Amino acid sequence: MTRGRGYALLALVVAAIVALSTAIYVGVASDDGLRNRNALGDGRAPNSAAPASTGTWVGTWSTSPSAAEPGTETTGMADRSVRNVVHTSVGGTGARVTLSNLYGQSPLNITRATIAVSAGSGTAAALADTMRQLTFGGGPTVVIPPGRQVMSDAVRVVVPHDSDVLITTYTPTSSGPVTYHRHARQVSYVAQGDHAQDTTGTPYTERTGSWRYLTALDVLSNESDGTIVALGDSLTDGITSTPDTNSRWTDVLADRLRSEIAAGRDLPRYSVVNQGISGNQVLADGLGRPADNPSGLNRFGRDVMERTNVKVVVIDLGVNDILRNPRLADPNAILNGLRTMVGQAHARGVKVVGATLMPFYGHRGYTEAREAVRQTINAEIRAGRVYDAVADFDQALRDPYDPRRLRADYDSGDHLHPSDKGYARMAESFDLETLKGSAPAEL
């Protein structure tokens, strides 16, 4: 072989290696841990406003679709702009959202969707220079079939941590029942007509305490390496927390984790998202098809495993299985349900922290027999026979003089749900060291 032919062959080999390496890099970089769920399918042009591929995609906010909104069966939100207000746990330089038509009975036609950083607390106004139009598969419109959801393309926008973000959708026609999360503890807004790109907030004269269609906000973040998902009932939903103050225990946990890391503590850099549904149970679904308020077991894959880049799940479920069962609940059935969810998490390499069940003496559903069921479940949890680690919310909030009840200043007044101070205590009692490490290896 001549020297010239040898150089030529070497150049071909090098070129092939570079091409293969590039293909591998592009394939890995495009897989952020959440498969494409765009209802429009593939083959569309990429969003020209997509952010550069730096940072990590994580969930900064999410909620669980819990039911079909009563009164929307006929007209839905036809010819109305829905401006959802959500609060971030971490910041980023790019964003994408997930919209759901889970409870719709006909296609949901969204002709315009936008994202912007709020101009302040308690307003529908946006910071004008942050207003961005969202696209779906490269186009400004999307049709979401009944029972489905869609993720938008990524868009360049600086989203600060601990801030309110406005995500607005406009649909010109009725789509039947509106998929919503009822107890947002956050005021959102509605305007007549297409005002998705409005920054003044003036047309948004209707206020609502629910989130509609929107189920997730992800950010491309240099602040976070993964997502903590809190799966729970009204205690996680924060049903008795003060609206518009972000006083759920998950909000306080996100603030606490960020502060500790900023102070130099060696902890995982994780965001926190909330998948609480008031009234939720481990075992039993609500009525309807699809079921309103699906059980923890039935929604675990959707609400935990499908969240972006999930590293840890915190489960706080079981009280409603005790209180809402017309007969005495079987603690072993509840524990087996919890263990099933733990197994599903471990199969995906996700660590599970589980909460003890808090007291409810004085609540109308209290009986000594139900208290015995709660104590049986808590004993198993504390013994390490359910979860990888324990958040002992029971010990943190109970009255030291009567452990069957919440301490008075942690009680909202109904003897079941915490006050704002109680929610803060839940987050403060959470051992941040339990977030370290991964799920144990399956034998």
Image (cartoon, helix red, strand yellow):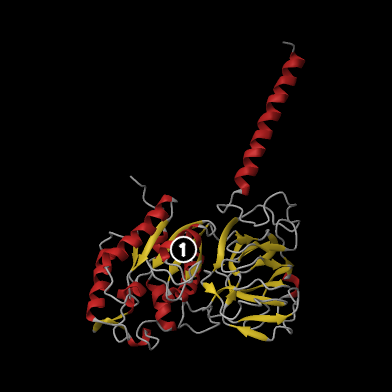
Q: Does any portion of residue 249 appear in the rendered image? A: yes
The residue that appears at 56% across and 77% down in the rendered structure is 69
Quarter in which the N terminus is drawn: top right
Q: Quadrant of residue 380?
A: bottom left
Give the percent coordinates (x, y) of residue 169: 69, 71
- 435 sits left or right of 164 in the view: left
The residue that appears at 55% across and 52% down in the rendered structure is 33
Q: Which residue is mark 1?
A: 299
Q: Secondary structure at mark 1?
A: helix
Give the percent coordinates (x, y) of residue 79: 73, 77
Give the percent coordinates (x, y) of residue 364: 32, 86
Q: Is residue 345 above or below residue 244?
A: above
Viewer-proximal residue, 410 or 335?
335
The residue furthest top is 1
Q: Amino acid at mark 1?
A: Arg
Q: Is residue 137 above or below residue 390?
A: above
The residue that appears at 68% across and 25% down in the rendered structure is 13
Q: Does any portion of residue 437 appear in the rendered image? A: no
The residue that appears at 72% across and 25% down in the rendered structure is 12
Quarter in which the C terminus is drawn: top left
